Image: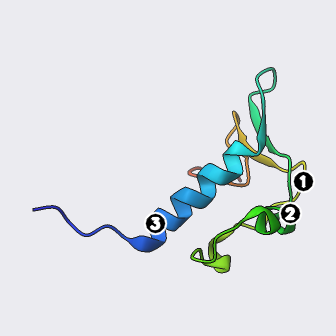
């Protein structure tokens, strides 16, 4: 029997994929950088089914994923002292 999937997780996955489609991948520095801001992203969105509260607050030029683990969309699994 298949378990029920969370609709919020599905929406977050859709939003994350849309953000990465509009991002710049810098292979030299190992970073993924946002090319659009949150307001630009919301204006590109043409469906009304997604919750606005699930969109992360990103700015243009913000590092989303970094090879050092300090990107804004990465979880910090280590403690800085």
Check the image and report above or below for 21 versus 81: above
Please report the residue visible at 66 percent of the width from the left and 79 percent of the height from the top. Answer: 53
Secondary structure under tag 2 reads helix
Please report the residue visible at 61 percent of the width from the left and 55 percent of the height from the top. Answer: 16
Rounded to the nearest angstrom, the CA distance separating label 2 from label 1 is 9 Å
Check the image and report above or below for 39 versus 62: below
Is disc 1 surrounded by few (<14), some (14 to 19) or many (20+) residues within 10 Å?
few
Secondary structure under tag 1 reads loop
Left or right position of 79 against 38: left
Left or right position of 17 against 37: left
Which of 26/17 is in front?
17
Which of 79/11 is in front?
11
The residue tagged 3 is 9
The residue tagged 2 is 40
x, y percent for residue 35: 86, 47
Secondary structure under tag 3 reads helix
Mark 2 or 3: the one toward you? 2
Q: Residue placed farthest to the top in the image?
A: 28
Mark 2 or 1: the one toward you? 2
Q: Earlier in the sequence, mark 2 or mark 1?
A: 2
Viewer can see residue 79: no
Left or right position of 4 against 71: left
Please report the residue visible at 55 percent of the width from the left and 64 percent of the height from the top. Answer: 12
Rounded to the nearest angstrom, the CA distance separating label 1 from label 3 is 25 Å
Is disc 3 surrounded by few (<14), some (14 to 19) or many (20+) residues within 10 Å?
few
* Contact, mark 2 vs mark 1 (Cβ under 8 Å): yes
Q: Earlier in the sequence, mark 1 or mark 3?
A: 3
The quadrant the N terminus occupies is bottom left
The residue tagged 1 is 60
State the image quarter where residue 30 is shown. top right
x, y percent for residue 66: 72, 38
* Contact, mark 2 vs mark 3 (Cβ under 8 Å): no
């Amino acid at each position: 029997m298949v378990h029920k999937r969370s609709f919020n997780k599905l929406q977050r996955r859709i939003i994350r994929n849309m953000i990465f489609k509009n991002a710049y991948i810098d292979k030299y520095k190992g970073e993924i950088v946002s090319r659009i801001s949150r307001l630009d992203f919301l204006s590109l969105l043409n469906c009304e089914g997604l919750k606005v509260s699930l969109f992360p607050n990103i700015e243009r030029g913000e590092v989303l994923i970094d090879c050092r683990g300090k990107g804004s969309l990465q979880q910090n699994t280590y403690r800085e002292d």
